[in-house]
Image (tube, rainbow, N blue to C red):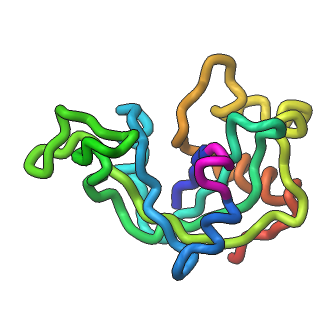
Amino acid sequence: MNYWLMKSEPDVFSFSDLKKRPRQTEPWNGVRNYQARNFMQSMEIGELGLFYHSNCPEPGIAGVMKISRTAYPDATSWDPQSDYFDPKSTPDHPRWFMVDVTYQARFPRFVSLAKMKSMPELEELLTLRRGNRLSVMPVEKKHFDIICREGGWKAPE
């Protein structure tokens, strides 16, 4: 199983918003970076992701979600009214993809970026590397487990 970290600005779409959605599920659309897109195309149903609030007063991880649908074309790229419109992407030749994610659990303790940076055992975490701004990235199981423990949540076996 692979593990993921997926970033969203909470004023655009937050972890609380995900919990409020029907079936607590939402398409993760609007990704416009090829490497992040490729990561999403490799996701499998049942894999777990950390929901990271970015570009806000206190960035960090609010909880865990599950991949509930594998990659499929992101139709927002075909909509000229969408902020995510890309004229080079078409229904016949989609350039961008999305996955569906489903709310799994809110951490009892929010795991802030500052807290993660202070933890030596997370120094190799991809999102903490200088210059890494990807919105979707893999997370090693050991890092996933450390973050979940810090957040006060134990993943089901």
Q: Nearer the viewer, residue 156 or 62?
A: 62
- Residue 96 relative to residue 154: left or right: left
Left or right of 146? Residue 124 is left
Q: Is residue 81 magenta?
A: no
106 vs 152, nearest the viewer: 106
Q: Residue furthest bottom?
A: 23
Q: How many marks?
A: 0
Residue at (37, 53) in percent of width and height = 98
Point 22% across, 46% down: residue: 78
The spot of residue 141 in percent (x, y) is 66, 52
Question: Magenta residues: mostly which secondary structure?
Answer: loop
Judged left or right of residue 153, residue 73 is: left
User: Above or below — where is 135 with respect to 128?
Assistant: below
Q: Is residue 20 left or right of residue 25?
A: right
Please tell me whether residue 13 belongs to the stretch shown in magenta.
Answer: yes
| Residue at figure coordinates x 55%, y 70% from the top left | 102
Instruction: Give the image quarter of residue 57.
Output: top right
Give percent across and percent down for residue 124.
71, 31
- Looking at the image, the residue that sits furthest to the left is 92
Q: Which residues are magenta?
A: 9-14
Going 73% across and 60% down the picture, which residue do you hit? 63
Viewer-proximal residue among 101 and 46: 101
Q: Position of residue 104 (x, y in %)?
A: 65, 72
The C terminus lies in quadrant: bottom right
Residue at the outermost top position: 131
